[in-house]
Image (cartoon, grey):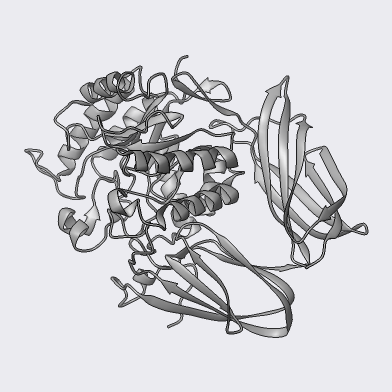
Amino acid sequence: MKVMVPSCLETYPGFGNYRGLASYETSFEAEGNIRLEFKGVSHFARVFVDGEETAQHYGSYTPFDICVKNLSPGMHSLKVIVDNDFRDEYVLDFPNDYMSYGGISRGVALEYIKDIYIDWIHVTPLREADGIWSIRAEVACQNLSESPLYADVRLKFLDTEACCQGKLLPPGKSIITFEDLEIADACPWSMEDPVLYPVSAALLQNGAVVDDMIERTGLRLVRVEGTSVLLNNKPLRIKGFCRHEDHPQYGCALPAEAIAYDLQLIKDLGANSVRTSHYPNDELFLDMCDELGILVWEENHARGINGDRMKSPYFEEQCEQVIREMITAHYNHPSIYIWGILNECGSETEYEKSCYRRQYDLIRHLDKSRPCSSASCRFGTDICQDLPDVCSWNIYPYWYDDDTASQKLQKLHDWLNTDGNGGGKPLLITEVGAGGIYGFRDTSSDVWSEDLQAEILEKQLKEIAASDDCIGMYIWQFCDVRVSRIWWALRRPKSRNNKGIVDEYRRPKLAYRIVRDIFTSLPNYREK
């Protein structure tokens, strides 16, 4: 059948619960060297150009690229074999409390390139004084030939220009770093005024440009100080939603218009942040958050993994691959203020702790400009709270827990400051909420009614907002989402996780107005 790309297998007629292989095929016209970038293929991809396999990639939510050299002029074939099955070697994908969709779920780009080209630009704001910003800029260049080549590397950010002349680029990747560039007359990026600037780089040989790239970023500083997370020296108050990429019509391949509508609702609800649970999100979503001044917690792809699954020989390798690809691709988005890993994964043994340590070390190696954290639910048994910059917890008072939110927060605070080894750090609630099925109203506020959901959320949010020990909260979740079949579906009415403030079609539930009233009454920043 003919399908649009990006799209999900499970949205095609007759494929609603399909698991297995599918072949996507098309043709394109080209000559010389080309670069194909796949923004997201789920779960496993094999790529063939003119019948020859050129790449394999596992990872549903991060981009990968391939280069093919010396194509003859004319038409060429492209085939991508996709596997969305659950297999032992796909450690991060298994039946879960959300739907693991298959297909080419994000865009594909074709680029014509020379023997050398620019792979990426990373800009790191270092400091600001008297309106002048100091930044570090890195330009990654690729040399496809088998011989070293010389080139000039030129960078421009507003009125600041820098050039590295006569740079020797050996075969493979080279990174050229411009340290302590001063940027004058630039405004900081903030939630209230999300100013974005272009940054460009060019490769020149014999004075002629052979490749260039234009990126976009914003200048802001994020740091942890004591029990606060500071944005431009202001202590943040997080008012956010956890959000899955999920829609009844589109699966996880939401078009730009659907993403924009989600963010309009999130802004209307008074939120200032979104947590990309539980995987890196589409760059279209991040672009819009940059433009709207919405802070993003972005995390790698891992939810509820522990025990033998964490001991799989593939686990650490696949987690670290996601981290590398996520940070490399999304580094320049000023909306991302924190990196997250391993949501509700095992954190109770020394082996599990070693996994956290390796992944935190990797994040800090790749990006020293942002804090990192992981959302835990293992109160009293988690031994990893000394590792993150922010202690983050998923709690469900009045729903799964008998404690009130105030009692739960006090217990968390006391434990983190003693046996939990997380004392003196910011405390962030990364999930809180309750279930409610759209249209089910009940005068006795029975379970799954919109009435009970609204009552619980009002108590949860007000008690968390009143806590001086907590920097904010993420509601689980923005919209109802589809879950995996059989085991999860048997626990979730309608085969949906029904804790959304809106249902899967974005229809507001009774809790919508309550959340909006509470969130809009809270400022974006806390007092120091």
- Quarter of the view holding residue 401: top left
- Quarter of the view holding residue 465: top left
Task: State the residue at coordinates (28%, 22%).
Answer: 415
Image position of 271 (left or right of 290): left
Q: Is residue 526 above or below residue 98?
A: above
Q: Of 497 and 102, which appears nearest the observer?
A: 102
Q: Position of residue 397 (x, y in %)?
A: 20, 31
Quadrant of the frame with the N terminus: bottom left
Q: Of 383 and 212, which appears nearest the observer?
A: 383
Task: State the residue at coordinates (59%, 49%).
Answer: 328
Can the viewer see residue 269?
no
Q: Is residue 88 above or below residue 13?
A: above
Image position of 514 (left or right of 210): left
Task: State the residue at coordinates (67%, 30%).
Answer: 126
Can the viewer see residue 68?
yes
Task: State the residue at coordinates (44%, 56%).
Answer: 258
Image position of 424 (left or right of 477): right
